[in-house]
């Protein structure tokens, strides 16, 4: 039996309930080269959901972790709209939203007045949503170093005035915290060990992640945009040992994964078991990563959590996730009993998955 390993999460019996809300659609598509490498011919586009998460504390109320993207994209700042026009000219692009988070919550019977706070993993448009749809009593929490300038006061700002107008805005800082989880600075948000904010820099100034305790011994890691594809996390030697890949997936990758692009112990066919480094990396060229080197370091620290049998790791845009988990109004808390980690960890390597991008496009 493989001995357990410690990621330094303090013990607690306090828990929260986590519910996933995907505001993206099947048509959501972006240029892959901005998010990952290598990009093989035929895989120039990257499909991805846009997940936000409702966190419910039994005593201290509800908070949102991210808001996805706003439905009325014409009300984004001119700077952001200009960026989207550039994206549209550079590669496959489609950003379609059926309904924003506030609409989903209301339809699911959640009173928006009950949302005590919104926590942005970072201030990109597909995470900030539309704060104006929430009452001004809802606090906004951001990571340290987040640019809070707003349009129109600052013409080049990415945020708009309604994002912060009239509400309390708090910057989460880590300087005074001695808590470390998986070697990442952490803050105990509710003060009882049920939900931690982790400092996960690299993608964008102020980027943070959330670690929710859903039973006394199981957790959900909300990674935001610390990476954009599960192949930037997997495989690793530790993951192979603690969450072994199903045999049928191993067998299928021998012919589906291009051995010339993705090295392993064999030149003739891909050998997943011998591959102990992630399939994909952070782009070396123009990308959405403000500090690629720091982002890579952050990912390396998160790998220990990804390989932990009691942690389910969810990033905001993992295209292998939709259809594999329960979504709002259902809870994610029973993930371990339902076997979701085993399924989600390796599903990106299945040819039928939207996350698969490792072979040759078939005619």
Image (cartoon, rainbow, N blue to C red):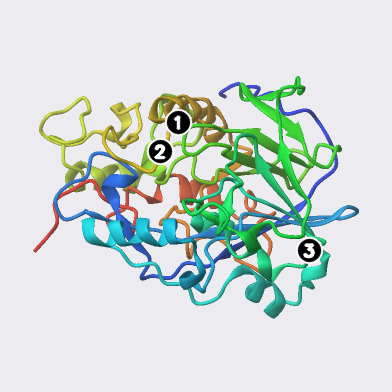
Q: Secondary structure at mark 3?
A: loop
The answer for how far apart the CA atoms under marks 2 and 3 are is 31 Å
Q: Mark 2 or 1, which is nearer the eye? A: 2
Q: Secondary structure at mark 2?
A: loop
Q: Is residue 184 above or below residue 33?
A: above
x and y, in percent, of residue 2 in the image: 56, 23
* Comes first in the chain, label 1 or label 3: 3
Give the residue pinned by disc 3.
Answer: 136
Q: CA distance from mark 2 to mark 1?
A: 7 Å
- Image mark for residue 289: 2
Q: What x and y, as percent, mark residue 38?
A: 23, 39
Name the N-terminal-most of marks 2 and 1.
2
Q: Nearer the viewer, mark 1 or mark 3?
A: 3
In the picture of the structure, the residue carrying the numbered disc 1 is 295
* Dot 2 and dot 1 residues touching (CB under 8 Å): yes
Quick check: 328 above or below 200? Answer: below
Quarter of the figure with the N terminus: top right
Q: Position of residue 111 (x, y in %)?
A: 79, 73
């Amino acid at each position: 039996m493989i001995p357990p390993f410690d990621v330094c999460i303090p013990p607690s019996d306090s828990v929260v309930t986590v519910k996933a809300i995907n505001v993206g659609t099947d048509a959501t598509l972006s240029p892959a080269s901005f998010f990952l490498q290598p990009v093989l011919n035929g895989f120039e586009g990257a499909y991805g959901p846009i997940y936000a998460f409702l966190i419910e504390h039994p005593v201290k109320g509800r908070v949102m972790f991210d808001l996805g993207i706003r439905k009325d994209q014409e009300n984004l700042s001119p700077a952001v709209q200009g960026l989207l026009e550039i994206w549209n000219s550079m590669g496959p692009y489609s950003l379609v939203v059926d309904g924003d988070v506030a609409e989903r919550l209301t339809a699911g019977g959640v009173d928006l007045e009950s949302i005590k706070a919104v926590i942005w993993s970072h201030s990109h448009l597909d995470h900030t949503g539309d704060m104006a749809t929430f009452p001004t009593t809802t606090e906004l929490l951001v990571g340290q170093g987040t640019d809070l300038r707003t349009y129109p006061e600052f013409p080049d700002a990415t945020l708009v005035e309604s994002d912060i107008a009239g509400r309390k805005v708090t910057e989460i800082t880590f300087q005074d915290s001695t808590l470390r989880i998986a070697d990442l600075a952490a803050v105990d948000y509710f003060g009882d060990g049920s939900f931690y904010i982790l400092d996960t820099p690299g993608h964008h100034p102020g980027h943070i992640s959330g670690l929710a305790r859903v039973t006394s011994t199981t957790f959900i890691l909300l990674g935001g945009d610390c990476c954009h594809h599960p192949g930037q996390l997997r495989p690793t030697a530790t993951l192979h040992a603690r969450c072994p890949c199903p045999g049928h997936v191993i067998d299928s990758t021998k012919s589906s994964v291009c051995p010339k692009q993705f090295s392993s112990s064999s030149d003739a066919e891909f050998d997943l078991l011998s591959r102990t480094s992630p399939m994909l990396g952070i782009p070396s060229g123009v990308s959405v990563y403000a500090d690629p080197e720091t982002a890579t370091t952050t990912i390396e620290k998160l790998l220990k959590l990804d390989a932990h049998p009691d942690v389910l790791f969810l990033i905001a845009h993992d295209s292998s996730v939709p259809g594999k988990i329960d979504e709002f109004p259902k809870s994610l808390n029973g993930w371990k009993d339902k076997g979701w980690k085993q399924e989600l960890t390796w599903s990106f390597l299945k040819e039928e998955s939207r996350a698969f991008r490792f072979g040759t496009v078939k005619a």
